[in-house]
Image (spheres, coloured by chain):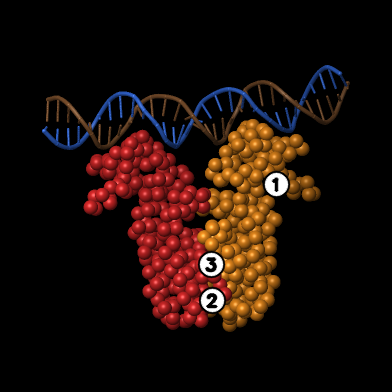
Chain colours: A orange, B red, C brown, D blue
Amino acid sequence: MTDVVDAADEPRAADGRVPGRRGLATRQRLLECAAEMLRTTSYRDLKVVDIAREAGTSPATFYQYFPDVESAILILADDMVQAGVAQFAEAVTGTTWRGRSGYEAAEALADAMITFWADHLPVLRVVDLATDEGDGRFANVRTRLLNDLNNALATAAADQQRAGRGQPGLDPNAVAGVLVAMLAHVSAHRLGFEFWGVRTDDLRATMARIIFWSISGQKPPV
Amino acid sequence: MTDVVDAADEPRAADGRVPGRRGLATRQRLLECAAEMLRTTSYRDLKVVDIAREAGTSPATFYQYFPDVESAILILADDMVQAGVAQFAEAVTGTTWRGRSGYEAAEALADAMITFWADHLPVLRVVDLATDEGDGRFANVRTRLLNDLNNALATAAADQQRAGRGQPGLDPNAVAGVLVAMLAHVSAHRLGFEFWGVRTDDLRATMARIIFWSISGQKPPV
DNA sequence: AGAGTATCTGACGCACCGTCAGGCCGAGCC
DNA sequence: GGCTCGGCCTGACGGTGCGTCAGATACTCT
């Protein structure tokens, strides 16, 4: 049974073959080298030749497993999403947005985003870039990563409004969208902020307060 | 006098010559074609050959006036900044952040950003992209565009804190940075939000409320 | 009209891309 | 051990766009 299911997303070589043990090893080595080189090289300067050479193989071999460089990175991005997609929404759904514990949820969310971006910066940079360049495949990855969070925040905002709290008159989806945009953009440029003398702790606290107030409508506890 | 000053930033051709009337016309035509093509073509697919052909000239001519495509766009970006840089900070410095007029200042700021991005979307897209790719020249443009606003917001946040309002305990620079990041990112992706059914009016209102509360610490007037 | 300068361009070398046809290698059979 | 066959790899190639010349062309001024 599982064989049939797995077969659907088993990696294929260029000619449609399903690679064997040795082939998969090569494929994996190429992926690892690509990830490694992304850490030091800008995405735009990442040449197939270099990845292949780094992996001790030839450019033609690369094309046997991936149609292009972006497809390889897309696989790295997919793995990353699968590993971390759940945690953001969890921080939101597990609170009533009341009092100190509500504020701590907002802080946990800000922290989760900052940490996740710090852990996966090279790949996330490419995701953001390619998305902005109009690459639908990467836009899709980004959506899968942030959609649950967005929905959870929108639901929370709507719930709070119904309870006579929150931000009456504001579209919950707009609130959620703005907050997610803020979180993603600030997390992505954390190092830029540090360069200008803004400490990450302060960014986290600022975002946590904005999140808490935007959703609950209450002044955050000191 | 002005001649001497102007000479410093007069356009130079590849060989250091200062172009004459005809040359400047060609240069201008190339810039306009580049701007025009940016509207329909993604920045990465913008080939020198195409711009040149569109302008009715040859690729070699292009290189007489610009070292590469990005330098040409950089000039478009420079013009754009010079045209619009002042207005953002003005919206911030001209208010005491009190009552309805304070909130209207926040709304005016959000509106100015959204409008500016809508007016200059193609060029700003490239600025954001190139900045994220680590291009210092474009990062510099972006800084020149947003720095005054950032400083104005940071000053306002600090002033309000001293007046016993605002967000005590938060770094004013962090507050300003987060707000600017939010404004820039949401404005840049306005069309994406519309696509997902979030109206621009709601984005503006949401951001205005967040700005007003983050700076003044007061509940926005209904 | 002719000299002199500003402006333009065809043609080239370079770098990287993505694709073949053909060579290697190792597992299984005799 | 030697043979064979299929999975795996690669050298070499055509294509595209870049950026740079030397030389052709167009304007200006006398």
Q: CA distance from mark 2 to mark 3?
A: 11 Å
Q: Nearer the viewer, mark 2 or mark 1?
A: 2
What label does residue B174 carry, if any?
3
Disc 2: which residue? B167
Residue nearest the viewer, comparing B18 with A169: B18
| Residue B62 picture location, percent across and down | 35, 39
The secondary element bearing badge 1 is classed as loop
Q: Label 1 lies in what chain?
A: A
| Residue B204 picture location, percent across and down | 46, 69
The secondary element bearing badge 3 is classed as helix
Q: Is residue A34 above or below residue A181?
A: above
> Could you say which quadrant of the image residue D19 lies in?
top left
Q: Is residue A119 above or below residue B162?
A: above
| Residue type at tag 2 | Gln
* Residue drawn 38% across the image and 46% down it: B72
The secondary element bearing badge 2 is classed as loop
Q: Earlier in the sequence, mark 2 or mark 3?
A: 2
Residue nearest the viewer, comparing A181 with B19: B19
| Residue type at tag 3 | Ala
